[in-house]
Image: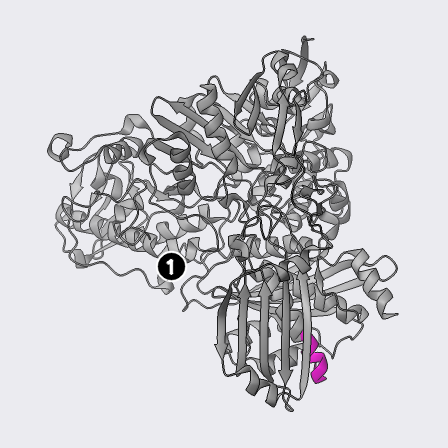
Amino acid sequence: MKPSDLDKLKVKPRIKDDEYTMFGPERRAGRMNLERREFLKLAGGGLVVFFTAGEALEGQIGGARGADGGYPDDPNAYLKVGPDGRVTCFTGKIEMGQGIITSLAMMLAEEIDVPLASVDMVMGDTALCPYDAGTFGSRSTKYFGPPLRQAAAEARGVLVRLASSRLGTAEEGLATKDGAVYALETPSKKVSYADLVGGRRIEVRLENKPPIKAIAKHTVSGRPTPRSDARAKVTGEAKFAGDIRYPGLLYAAILRPPAHGAKLKSADTSAAERFAGARVLRDGDLIAVLHEKPDLAAEALTLVRAEFEPSPSKLDNETIFAHLKEVPANSDVVVESGTLDEGAKLAVKNVERSYFAHYVAHAPSEPHTAVVRIEGDKAEVWASTQSPFRARQEVAKTLDLPVENVRVRTPFVGCGFGGKNQGGQIVEAARLAKLGGRPVQVAWTRQEEFFNDTFRPAATYDIRSGLDASNKIVLWDYKNYQAGSRSSQPVYDIPHKRVLSFGGGFGGGGVAVHPFGTGAWRGPGSNTNIFATECHIDIMAQEAGMDPLAFRLANLADARMKKVVAAAAGQFGRTFARAPSGRGYGIAITDYLGSYVAAMAEVEVDRARGAVRVLRVVCAQDMGECINPDGARMQIEGCVTMGLGYCLTEEIRFKDGRVLTENYDSYEVPRFSWLPRIEVVLVDNPDLAPQGCGEPAVTVMGAVIANAIHDAIGVRLFTLPMTPARIRAALASRA
Amino acid sequence: MDKTIRFKLNGREVAVETSPERMLLWVLRTDLEHTGTKYGCGEGFCGACTVLVDARPERSCQFPLAGAEGKSVLTIEGLSRGGKLHPLQQAFADLGALQCGYCTPGMILMAYALLLRKPDPTEAEIADALEGNLCRCGSYNRIIAAVRQASQALKMKVVDREAL
């Protein structure tokens, strides 16, 4: 691909340099810094609406932070109305499959009143988009959506004001539809956004921020809408970082240690240097072979003879849990109310259990990839990343360049799940591009992906709880070690409770805690906190002599949660009985950062083999106002399917710093034959602002399957994943 | 030792001068700039790199270029005709049978090979045929529905084998 083609990568490429019409550069020169001009040049011409004369563009667009490090107040940071009437949305968020390329466009189209097809998305480009901390935590719709809507409403207000003078009609007598402003009394009297905008610069001051539309008036938002990127993705036209080509691009293959913490002793690169077309680069511990063909770079790398010190790590899957409890760690009080002593006094039945979760990999379909080109004192980066602005900082630091001289662009990203918050490959590509004087691509192999990934941390949980004589939960003493605090506060109505979270959680912990990198994994902290919590609730239901649904409802005070549970139960259509009933029904619920989920599952277990077959999963979710119901269903279905992996098979095997699971033969992810019947229920709640959707449903999967397995065979698994070997062992130890 | 290897790529004759030992995946992606075919695992476990060689699905990361000599290679770029999507592509798009889209080209080509062999597969036969193709986003249920829909759309075309 030629560099001149690079701007055509987006789904609907509309931004061309030749559309650029500089507006009043002489007049504004004193107020505009270079970055601003660069933005306008890159973003093209058309209407950049000046909401408050003179100051609107200052320090807002182009990667600047808002006043508090959040999103900027200036609507221009979010959108542009082009001379053709098309509306471009600028967002620092990225598209990795979660579907915001469609749902954010829907929010914008709705509020500014253009057809959805008239919206172009520019995502994850640090030169064009407002600063964004990263795409994670199911936060895009929840936190980026509202300012985008506000910006669109303001832009619409500006267009109405412009139309008012053009049409000679008072603003109150005007309305907008399909990219035009028209007179309410004479609808034929109208002017399109394109005509209003032309190629000019317009300054308008709005006295008040216009209100956003009432949901009842929505015609785009809230309607099931197909993915706007589907066509690009089914034709192979969609570009991922590894598909970016520069003239002179070299592909890097990097020497890796055999184990984490193993330091390089010596390396003989002479044979690799003799490999035709290969260049060997070395920068401290970084040794790489570069070649014009990626496969030949990899072949030449095998000729490097290197010796490493042994890893200092002596941990493995068997010893890790004891280690995690022993390693010194600070504790956070996540929630505390009443007193544990009082709760213990009230309790007539007590349950005390420990739970365990192993390391799991993100295993994104697309391994971490980046391309870096350095030209003079500027660097351009294309990366598969969830955090382009963080990547910009890291590249600027690596190359010793001012941050504004680095532009990070994010094409389509092939899965993230938190794993691409970290961009080690980007820094590697930057170092090698600098050292080699040529554009460089670093694309991790699958084996490197399993080695360099920041795994979901292994973690342990201790729960002590008590029931009073009426089977109300009166005591909840919860401790997690290294899981992270998210979703560790119980959703149940418990008078005496304390939740402690020990260690760095998914934020890290360092080499003293974990033998390798750890980080956020889809629904971080939550997916294992919910496993422990909701398994424990099931055990208490059993102690209470109640079925797990009735027990939960009896201990819930939150009406919204009860409604979600009822919605799931209605769809599930089975009657729960005190476990184990032999029928293999399970239930689990959660409040994931404001999105409520209730899942019910049916499983069968082959006792001889220990194999679990998940037959059916019902998942009800209340995420507040739902922007794209079809997109939400896709996310929930994906959460259910992906969640089966950490339930049943996914576990990083490791020993002495080595990662033994190196590919999909030893790390088993869900595949077609696992597929249960998945039934999604979207619980309508438009009065609540949009919450998140990409992660919530994955967090209940561990518990709902564990509870269903217990209901099927009367044996409880306390460790994730619930592999056939663990199930056979649990059955054997009971017998 | 470099050699000139000729084959048909999406119906057009191509000639590549390179080592015939190299895997087809990298020749397609790098030498021929057909980047629709994706690297996923490098060992044939995931199916992201699936292409058709003389109508047989092959893992291009495991398929030496020499094996393509004189044959017909079909990649995702060759599926649509005159800007019109193939019924499989259309069904994947219509039913949302993709999220991140990285596994999609391999998935569609594997399904294409299935429909060549079995024009009217059941859901179970689709799942079985695609078992070796991994979708981390978890679109399996929609992929099965999309392949079914495409098979019905193709059947309505009076079993037009050429359309495949």
Colouring scheme, one of rainbow, by chain, secondary structure, one colour: one colour
Q: Position of residue A228 (x, y in %)?
A: 47, 43
Snapshot quadrant of residue A12: top left
Q: Is A691 or A703 nearer to us in this picture?
A: A703
Q: Is residue B122 left or right of residue A631?
A: right
Residue underneath mark 1: A218
At 63% across and 61% down in the image, what residue appears?
A326
Q: Is residue B103 visible?
A: no
What's the magenta bit mostly, secondary-structure-wise? helix
- Percent of width and height locating residue B36: 58, 30
Image location of residue A140, percent across then percent down: 43, 53
A489 on left or right of B49: left
Magenta stretch in the rendered image: A538-547
Using residue A694 as the reference point, say whether residue A668 is left or right of it.
Answer: right
| Quadrant assignment, res A49 | top left
Judge whether residue A337 is colored magenta.
no
Q: List the single residue furthest toward the bottom.
A: A469
**Three-letter code for the amino acid on which mark 1 is drawn:** His
A709 over A473 or under it: above or below: above
Q: Which chain's residue wears label 1?
A: A
Asked whether residue B1 is in view, the answer is yes
Residue A474 occupies quadrant: bottom right
Residue A27 in the image: above or below residue A356: above
Which is more toward the observer, A19 or A539?
A539
Q: Percent from the top left, x then y, of residue A473?
A: 60, 83
